[in-house]
Amino acid sequence: TLLFGNEPKILRPGVETTYQIGPIILSKIQIIGVTITIFILIGTFVFLKKHKYGRAIRALCDNPTLVSILGINVRTIRLIVFGIGSLLAALAAIFSALDVGMEPHIGLPALLTGVVAVIIGGVGIFEGAIIGAFLLGLLQNLLIWKVSTRWEEAITLLILVIFLLYRPQGILGKKGRLEEV
């Protein structure tokens, strides 16, 4: 903010080429972003299910003590997860900045949306986070269509409160005893 100011900065000036698919209008960067996202989701799913480090990551989520007893370096696995997560966040930030520009506080709504999507889908469930993100995005856009865009974060928090009250384990989560949580 001190160096560049508070106003949004546009990275790609000019009019972006758009494509119409039925009633949906998408820019070139949005189409590229969706395509890359699909490949990343498939790649991440295959990595977590088939690769040695992917299985170690899933095991670490379930029982860190057992993973360390089995001789797997927990610190290395956590560094790999941190690196992959940082890479994916950077990629999402680049596409977002190319699409709508950037400002100093652009990450806060994205963080809120991401956390709510994980809670909606079920904490610790990879497929749940994907389902939660699609459901949250759909609900946000349908409600914004009927109301104002200024209410997007309020709508997100309202959806979070509804899920925490009526389905705190998420869509794919299973109810467990309080001692197991």
Image (cartoon, rainbow, N blue to C red):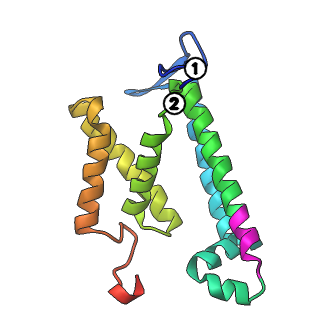
Query: Which span is picked out in magenta?
Result: 72-79
Instruction: Tell me: 51 left or right of 2.
Output: right
Determine the residue located farthest toward the front in the rendered image: 2
Q: Position of residue 146 (x, y in %)?
A: 21, 33
Residue linked to disc 1: 4
- Disc 1: CA contacts within 10 A as few (<14), some (14-19) or many (>=20): few
Q: Is residue 47 left or right of residue 142?
A: right
* Distance from Cα at disc 1 to Cα at disc 2: 9 Å
Q: Quadrant of residue 99?
A: top right
Closer to us: 6 or 101? 6
Visible residue check, residue 152:
yes
Coordinates of residue 3 in the picture (x, y in percent): 60, 22
Q: Main secondary structure of the magenta part?
A: helix
Query: Residue 155 falls in which quadrant of the image?
Result: top left
Query: Who's the residue at 56% across and 9% down the image?
Result: 14
Number of on-image labels: 2
